[in-house]
Image (tube, rainbow, N blue to C red):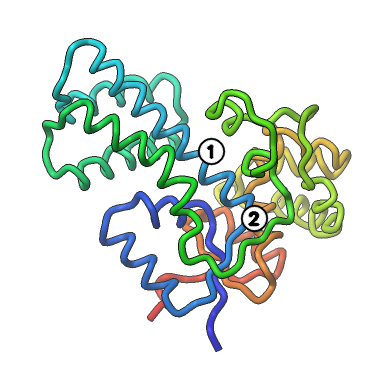
Amino acid sequence: MLNKIFVETTIYIERLFGEAARQAQIEGNLEDAVFSTSSYVYMEFRRTMLQAISYVLSVARQMLKEGQKNIDLVSLLRRLSAGTAISFSLRNFQRVMLIYSYLLDHFSTFIVPAAMLIDYLEYNLNITIPERFFESIDEYINHTNCDLVSPGAPVGDYLRSRLSCNARRAKCALVSFLQQHQTELQKLELALAAAAPEKVNPRTLAALKKINVDILKALGQRNCWHLGDVIIALEAPDDALLYTTDGHFDLICSVLGKQLFLESEAK
């Protein structure tokens, strides 16, 4: 019987934008499995990578505007590092560096025509993210009906509409989904509150405390995104192994009775 593997955001990012050897390793782990994921994972993946790629793209365009028809990727790295140090979290900085490494792998040279670099970044922004995500998926779960990835959702500015969510405008099914799991949410709050600090994302615990008082507080990016690990773990089918590199899932999955896919035990 084939394993069912539910792929979480961190693995998805490496699957499409990691180094070639890492991409091959992940594809090998998924090759003989039933490949499952969700609309919430797609939202996290797309939001994260849209933000990273659009930032790199904005820096490349600025360099072209300054007259650099050929971009030195070492100079690009300096620009990216200066900007991310000011305006990005550590995790987002890591995503930007992942995109930078992805560019190095693709071009195999440090001097790249600016127009070619910009075209490639735009291709990944418009094609790789929305199309390659769905390659080889066997099961796509949509319990939350997230507005940010709903094809029928009205949008204004494309990037802005996919990078933010306002609780007052949210039309998703997140609240009704979480209402089905209120017992589990209470258990998770107690378990995370009692756990060692290094095993817990404090923002996840804070968001759990809020929604266990008022479930409507789950709407909007302030709490929804901090609940991401919980939402994804709840979405994962009971018969699936959850594939992630995020250590915060260890405790969450243990409380929920969900199993993790361990690369160390893969064939």
Say which quadrant the N terminus sits in.
bottom right
Residue 58 found in image quarter: top left
x, y percent for residue 100 = 28, 37
Q: Which residue is mark 1?
A: 47
Q: x and y percent of residue 3 in the render?
A: 54, 80
Residue in the picture at 69% in, 60% down: 235
Q: Is residue 121 visible?
A: yes
Q: Provide residue 253's location: percent of width, then percent of height.
A: 64, 63
Is label 2 in a helix, a strand or a loop? helix
Residue drawn at 73 percent across, 33 percent down: 220
Identified by mark 1, the residue type is Arg
Mark 1 secondary-structure assignment: helix
Residue denoted by label 2: 232
Dot 1 surroundings within 10 Å: few (below 14), some, or many (20 or more)? many
Question: Closer to us: mark 2 or mark 1?
Answer: 1
Task: Examine the rendered structure and indicate whether residue 257 appears above or below residue 167.
Answer: below
Q: Residue at x 73, y 50 (%)?
A: 144
